[in-house]
Image: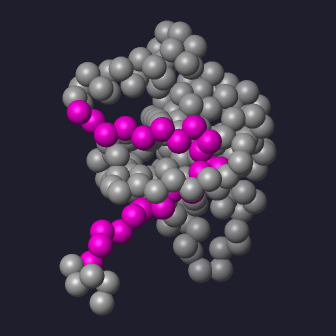
Amino acid sequence: AEGSTATINQPFDLVLTSAGGYPLDLTFYQSVKGLVAALPALRPDSTVLEVSDCSEGLGSHSYAELMLSYNNDWRRFLADIAQPGRPAQLDQWQYQMHTRLLERVGVERVRLVSDGIPPDVQRRLSVNPVLGSGDARRRAQRFVDEFLRDHPGARIAAIPDGPYTMLAVRSAPSRDGGR
């Protein structure tokens, strides 16, 4: 996929994104990039829904170990890495990026649809998995349908290329004409 910039005027109620497709959607580590790319389109009460294959699991052994050891306790992770003199852990950078999203919308509003990671593992990754019957495509569609039913008139954005798309927020014109 080629990179592009999309200009938005304001945040959305629901942002649909991806990791950018194959090969970036093979692991959760890479998928986080699609989630973080949605940040400019999110306000604290927005929801982000990412559909990602993750057929190769979480990513490196060190990343998987890090994510599972914190078991959704991202605030403890941030406190731990802020300790003076504490050496950086391999692959902690991606969890740090993930926490930017969590600081904005919280775990509850970060929704993941994936057939590649078992549900019990997804529940430990600081995301709120979209589970239930059907494959990822059906679960994602059902989630969107239910969101629209529960939030009539919701503003929805789709970022099909995830991290390949940079969102730019258009600033409001100044009242003095830019003087």
Residue 9 horizontal side relative to residue 80, left or right: left
Can residue 160 be found in the magenta stretch? yes
Return the x and y of residue 140 as percentages of the image width and height.
Answer: 48, 23
Q: Is residue 105 above or below residue 90?
A: above
Q: Is residue 89 above or below residue 112?
A: below
Which residue is situated farthest in the top direction here? 133
Q: Is residue 15 above or below residue 179?
A: above
Q: Which sits in the foreground, 102 or 69?
A: 102
- In which quadrant of the rendered view does residue 161 lie? top right
Which residue is pictured at 36% across the width and 20% down the height?
145
Q: Which sits in the foreground, 121 or 97?
A: 97
Q: Which residues are magenta?
A: 153-174
Q: Which sits in the foreground, 128 or 78?
A: 128
**Does any portion of residue 158 appear in the rendered image?**
yes
Which residue is pictured at 30% across the width and 26% down the height?
148
Q: Which sits in the foreground, 173 or 158?
A: 173
Return the x and y of residue 53 as percentages of the image width and height.
Answer: 67, 28
Which residue is pictured at 75% across the width and 34% down the height?
22
Q: Quadrant of the N terminus?
A: top right
Residue 126 horizontal side relative to residue 147, left or right: right
Return the x and y of residue 168 as percentages of the image width and height.
Answer: 48, 61
Q: Quadrant of the C terminus?
A: bottom left
> For the image shown, how many numbered marks are present on the structure?
0
**Does any portion of residue 36 appear in the rendered image?**
no
